[in-house]
Image (cartoon, grey):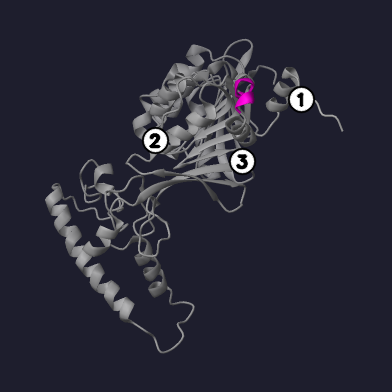
Amino acid sequence: MNSKPLTYDSLKTVLLYMEPSIRFLLSSRAPSITVTDRVVPLKINDFRIELHSIKINQNVYEYQVYQVDCKDKLPYKVSGYSRLNGRWNCNVDEFGIRDYINEADGMVPGNNGLRETNLFGEFDLKNIPTNKARLKKLKRRLSVERKRSNQLSNYRSAEKPSNNNNSIRDFIEIRHDDAQNTKEELELLKNGEMIHVTYRQGNSEPCVIERLEYTGGIHKAGESLMKFMFAKRGIILLNKLSIVSECRIRMPLDLKIMVKYLELVANVSSKVEMLKLIMDESSCDQLNINFDSEDTEELDQEFIGHFTILVVEGNNQLTLPFIQSLPNQTVEFKNLSVRFLQSDDFIILIRSWMETNKPLGTSFTFQTVIREPDVLHILERVLDEFEESRAGEQCVDIPMNNDTVLKISYGRRNGYSLMIKMDVVPLDY
């Protein structure tokens, strides 16, 4: 059977509809198609950057620090989530121990007067301002835990433990993962860390595709991985991009992406600054942001204004100035504090829409935890505040001009939670 190589145009068509992970592999194994591969736009349906992992459609690439020269010669993970204190840690010190101190700017975490867990996963609200005093308290706690560990290790029940007695097993499991090492063990662990880059498809078992010597800074592995995937390419077409990692990670500056649906979680402002360098804002459709209160005053209004739909969640204490400043035509607030809707700020927001004559189609939705009688009370107050308003079915209408009406209504989302909506609708809707 005779076979002919693909023509240039045929190869471009095949590459355009090929799964991204296969394109990465072919381009690295077959240099002859590398130039063509970089010219053809890369299509990705779901691109998700998580803590120490990158997900492209159903394929997940993860990078973690592993200890490889322990006594049993089997690697075990020392970065990431710790079950002992519920904390996430990126890097380790020279002995392979999670480096919480450097990540907390040189201070022992906790005991700062805030609701922050200490190294044992507890909320100790006592404010200890000096690191020396925090270390002293930590040493006392370690002494107690060491004695408890010895007691549990020496305990052997004569009877089979009941199903309800899980404390010993759970503690032993934590000890194996998170226990403090002795000086002799630390000598064995020193300088034995490597970064394992793994790959898995769907729910399959991950396999190691690369091992890198760990020299500090695990995020360099993630940046190198994205550089391998995306550097020197043309446009990358993303249906959905989610950046949910709290870690700060850089993307190749020569990257150019077009995104329809964008989701940003934590450190939103810094992620927006990064995306502005590489993102074509002409294709934007919906933006979901989940942020802390520090982000609200720093958000780039011009950037978020490129999205037709904006969904805001993660902070139920949003202020009136922030809500008024949003340029998007459709905005949905999830988990908003009911106090906003019951305060004068909600009335001020309605008046500002009337004064600025918001355009037809503008719609804000406030999803909150509220009872139906309280919703009715809010609508009754709107009726009292605006003389020209009139009551409708589950709504209040306020004429804006000869063509439009501001409709304040309420309903249920998915048949369960209540929401209040502000819609600019035609006069004869």
**Front residue of 182 and 350:** 182
The nearer-to-camera label among 2 and 3 is 2
The span shown in magenta is 31-37
**Front residue of 101 and 113:** 101
**Amino acid type, label 1:** Pro
**Front residue of 143 and 15:** 15
- The secondary structure that dominates the magenta segment is helix
| Disc 2, SS | helix
Residue located beneath label 2 in the image? 220
Q: CA distance from mark 1 to mark 2?
A: 39 Å
Q: Earlier in the sequence, mark 1 or mark 2?
A: 1
Relative to residue 229, is residue 429 drawn left or right?
right
Expressed as whole percent of the image width and height from the top left, the position of residue 284 reads 57, 21
Q: Quadrant of the N terminus?
A: top right
Residue located beneath label 1 in the image? 5
Relative to residue 351, is residue 42 drawn left or right?
right
Q: Find residue 296 and report its image quarter.
A: top left
The nearer-to-camera label among 3 and 1 is 1
| Disc 1, SS | loop
Residue under the point 25% across and 43% down? 102
Mark 2 neighbour density, 10 Å: few (under 14) some (14–19) many (20 or more): some
- Residue at the limit of the structure toward the bottom, as seen here: 158
**Amino acid type, label 3:** Arg
Expressed as whole percent of the image width and height from the top left, the position of residue 157 reads 39, 86
Expressed as whole percent of the image width and height from the top left, the position of residue 188 reads 29, 59
